[in-house]
Image: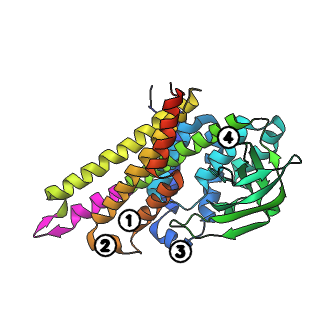
Amino acid sequence: MDFTPTEEQEAARELAGRIFADLATHERLRAAGTGTDAELWKALCAAGLPGAVEETGLLGLVLLLEEQGRRTAQVPFAASCVYGILAVARHGTEEQRSRLLPGLRDGTTVVTGALPAPGAVTSRDDGRLSGAVDWVPWLRDATHVLVPDEDRVLWLVRTEDAAAVEAVELTAPWAAARLVLDGTPAERLGQGGPSSHDDVLAAARIAFAGLQAGVCAGSLARAVEHTSVREQFGRPLSTHQAVQLRAADAHMDTEAIRVTAYEAAWRFDEGLDASGAALTAAWWASEAGKRVVHAGQHLHGGTGADLDHPVHRHFLWGRQLDAYLGCGTELLAELGDLLAMGDLS
């Protein structure tokens, strides 16, 4: 396998990095509060970055999400790309692709996903859904939400048709909401069944693991900068062995998240079975990501406890991604089931 970015992937990553650096500043994030930065989302879409994912694949998306994570940029980029563009492009009918993809590319259509939510929603023969999902990321920004039913069939629901979209404040500012469906009309995504569901879920786990890699890299970069200039007993904190060891452990954890996300994305793009690799990436992102953002905050000392300091935002995102991806024991149990069934290549 070769994780070297193609020219197209590298160009997209560099462009995303510049846009996030210019617009996802600490001052703008403070001003945004818990909401989405509409100007940043407009800039990303005007640059063609969501649409570029159709060409650069899931690995290309992971590279872009690393840049988002470094800045904890408050836009529904991960959700709309993985639950919208990739899901519709891979599993939608020709009519759905022609109708939905243009809006997804220019940002006027935003899709999020109520995954994983096993058994939370039931479907009727006429395509109407009932049930509730306690929280869905970026739902307040979405025009559509991708919902699995009890049989793992994926349905697209227009948020304006939902019985209720009730705002929920999470650890991280993800514009989340509780989704309530009560005989809500929906359209089936393509003709697929459980295999489409499993494919989208694997892609989501890989994408959000890539986002966590960026969050951790950003947290660690801030910690390195802080400990290099902050002095104690006349020496920079970075010269103390305990600080160096803590930072080194965080670096190794961050690299483990990145490389497992890259491998899983590569397998996905190559058409190989990526279910086990996706769970592995999700486990590293959940377990190691939690350690990294704690270390980043700890290495800032008392400053890390300041809710107004940029590193605290990385801590909040890292913990939210840990919760979203699923706790380590749950992911390991699912991975163990795959091993026991011999479903891993």
- Judging by the rendered image, the residue that carries numbered circle 4 is 197
Of labels 2 and 4, earlier in sequence is 4
Viewer-side label of 3, 4: 4
Q: Earlier in the sequence, mark 1 or mark 2?
A: 2
The disc labelled 2 sits on which kind of residue?
Answer: Thr
Q: Give the residue number, with chain letter if any, for mark 1.
A: 311
Badge 1: few (under 14), some or many (20 or more) residues near its Cα, within 10 Å?
Answer: many
Q: Nearer the viewer, mark 3 or mark 2?
A: 2
User: Horizontal and vertical percent for residue 82?
Assistant: 62, 45
Name the residue type under label 4: His
Residue 225 painted magenta: yes
Q: Which residues are magenta?
A: 219-236
Crowd rating for badge 4 (residues with CA inside 10 Å; few <14, some 14–19, many 20+): many
Q: Is residue 251 left or right of residue 2?
A: left
C-alpha gap between disc 2 and disc 4: 43 Å
The answer to whether the residues at label 2 and label 4 have Cβ atoms under 8 Å apart is no
Q: How many marks?
A: 4
Residue 79, percent from left and from top: 62, 52
Element type where label 4 sits in the image: helix
CB-based contact (under 8 Å), mark 1 and mark 2: yes
Q: Is residue 311 left or right of residue 116?
A: left
Against 298, residue 267 (above or below) is: above
Q: Label 3 to label 1, Cα distance in Å?
A: 16 Å
Mark before the other along the chain sequence, 4 or 1:
4
Residue denoted by label 2: 303
Circle 2 — which element? helix
Residue hosting label 3: 31
Q: Main secondary structure of the magenta part?
A: helix
* Marked residue nearer the N-terminal end (3 or 4): 3
Which residue is depicted at the point 58% across and 40% down?
Answer: 202
Q: Amino acid at mark 1?
A: Val
